[in-house]
Image (cartoon, rainbow, N blue to C red):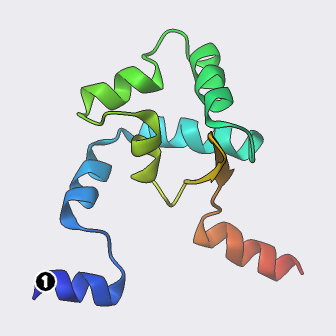
């Protein structure tokens, strides 16, 4: 019954919600900032920029592994409110997903 209700409401499965909760909010905010500036760039560019900008901390690959997630792209799929991934050929590109507040603000400006 609960799965049917989640499907109807278009909510992610509980496993995804639990995995999303494990991702540190600091990492999510860092990724949000990078994706905002690197919108439309290949995933590899974002990973390298993260590594350059946050040298003292762990890389995205290390963070994903620590959380039990096999890849950075799977890590990003857990935060669809921040990042949208698209594939063109063999390349994966990252796109910024504005928050509902940002969407509302841009509508007011029009």
Tell me: 24 left or right of 17: right
Picture residue at 66% right of the left edge, 53% below the top: 96
30 vs 66, nearest the viewer? 66
Picture residue at 62% right of the left edge, 20% below the top: 48
Give how far across and how far down residue 6 sits, in percent.
25, 82
Counting other residues with Cα less than 10 Å from the Cα at mark 1, is it few (<14), some (14-19), or many (20 or more)? few
Give how far across and how far down residue 22 sits, in percent.
26, 43
Picture residue at 62% right of the left edge, 28% below the top: 44
103 vs 42, nearest the viewer? 42
Q: Quadrant of residue 53?
A: top right
Give how far across and how far down residue 12 sits, in percent.
31, 69
Q: Quadrant of the N terminus?
A: bottom left
Find disc 1 in the rendering and name its residue: 2
Tell me: 48 left or right of 39: left
Q: Quadrant of the C terminus?
A: bottom right
Tell me: 4 left or right of 63: left
Picture residue at 49% right of the left edge, 9% below the top: 56
Q: Going by the picture, which residue comes out furthest to the left?
A: 1
Give how far across and how far down residue 66 sits, in percent.
26, 26
Q: Quadrant of residue 91?
A: top right
105 vs 33, nearest the viewer? 33
Q: Secondary structure at mark 1?
A: helix
């Amino acid at each position: 019954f609960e799965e049917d209700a989640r499907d109807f409401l278009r909510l992610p499965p509980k496993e995804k919600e639990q995995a999303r909760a494990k991702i540190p909010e600091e990492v999510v905010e860092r990724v949000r900032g990078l994706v905002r500036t690197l919108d439309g760039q290949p995933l590899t560019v974002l990973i390298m920029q993260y590594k350059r900008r946050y040298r003292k901390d762990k890389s995205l690959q290390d963070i994903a592994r620590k959380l039990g997630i096999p890849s950075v792209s799977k890590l990003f799929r857990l935060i669809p409110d921040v990042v949208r991934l698209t594939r063109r050929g063999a390349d994966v590109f990252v796109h910024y997903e504005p928050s509902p507040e940002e969407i509302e603000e841009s509508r007011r400006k029009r």
